Amino acid sequence: MEKLIFYICTFVLISFTIGSKLGSREVHYITCLTENNVSDDDMFTIQDIIEDKHKQENQERIKKNGCVIQCLLQKEGVMEGSEYDVEKMHSKFTKRTNAPSGSKKVETLDNCINETKDLTEKCDKSFALTECLVKAEEREKSRHLPIERLG
């Protein structure tokens, strides 16, 4: 399957590829699967998120994905429990993406943080953040498609 690299939450290192599992390119992926008693088969692909296929799944599978993502974010040091460390998130994001402060990418990150910051359950919050970032990245890519590909 053709690979298209994306980083978890673009900033926090959850690399993804269309067809690959959320977070599967991260160093702590297997550890987080094990710690959360989740199998690789339980993880959604980026394409599942883009196409909203995950919304047809039961809440337990969505929660499992969120818990693995939260584990990855925590191991990366940008989340503790259900709280974001926004300063570290910005630092790691700009380092990983070379996105300057005030750029569209940083604005997108901030928008997703703001959309999800009031969620109190850590797994739900992590999944919502990832979903927001994946969809924002996809919208941004589709804006830059050549006109002949849009029709």
Image (cartoon, rainbow, N blue to C red):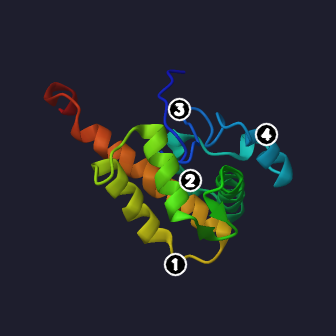
Tell me which amino acid carries mark 2: His
> CA gap, disc 2 to disc 3?
16 Å
26 shown above or below 38:
above
User: What residue is shown at x 56% (from left), y 76% (from top)?
Assistant: 119
Which secondary structure, mark 4?
helix
Provide the residue designation for mark 3.
17
36 shown above or below 17:
below
User: What residue is shown at x 49% (from left), y 30% (from top)?
Assistant: 5
Sooner in the amino-acid sequence: mark 3 or mark 1: 3
Q: Quadrant of the C terminus?
A: top left
Of the two numbered discs 1 and 2 in the rendering, the one whose residue sits closer to the viewer: 1
Tell me which amino acid carries mark 1: Asp
Which secondary structure, mark 3?
loop
Q: Quadrant of the N terminus?
A: top right
Q: Nearer the viewer, residue 134 or 110?
A: 110
Q: Position of residue 3 (x, y in %)?
A: 51, 24
114 shown above or below 25:
below
> CA gap, disc 4 to disc 1?
29 Å
> CA gap, disc 3 to disc 1?
29 Å
Q: Is residue 92 left or right of residue 73?
A: left
Q: Are marks 4 and 3 in contact (CB under 8 Å)?
A: no
Tell me which amino acid carries mark 4: Ile
Provide the residue designation for mark 1.
118
Of the two numbered discs 4 and 3 in the rendering, the one whose residue sits closer to the viewer: 4
User: What residue is shown at x 38% (from left), y 45% (from top)?
Assistant: 137
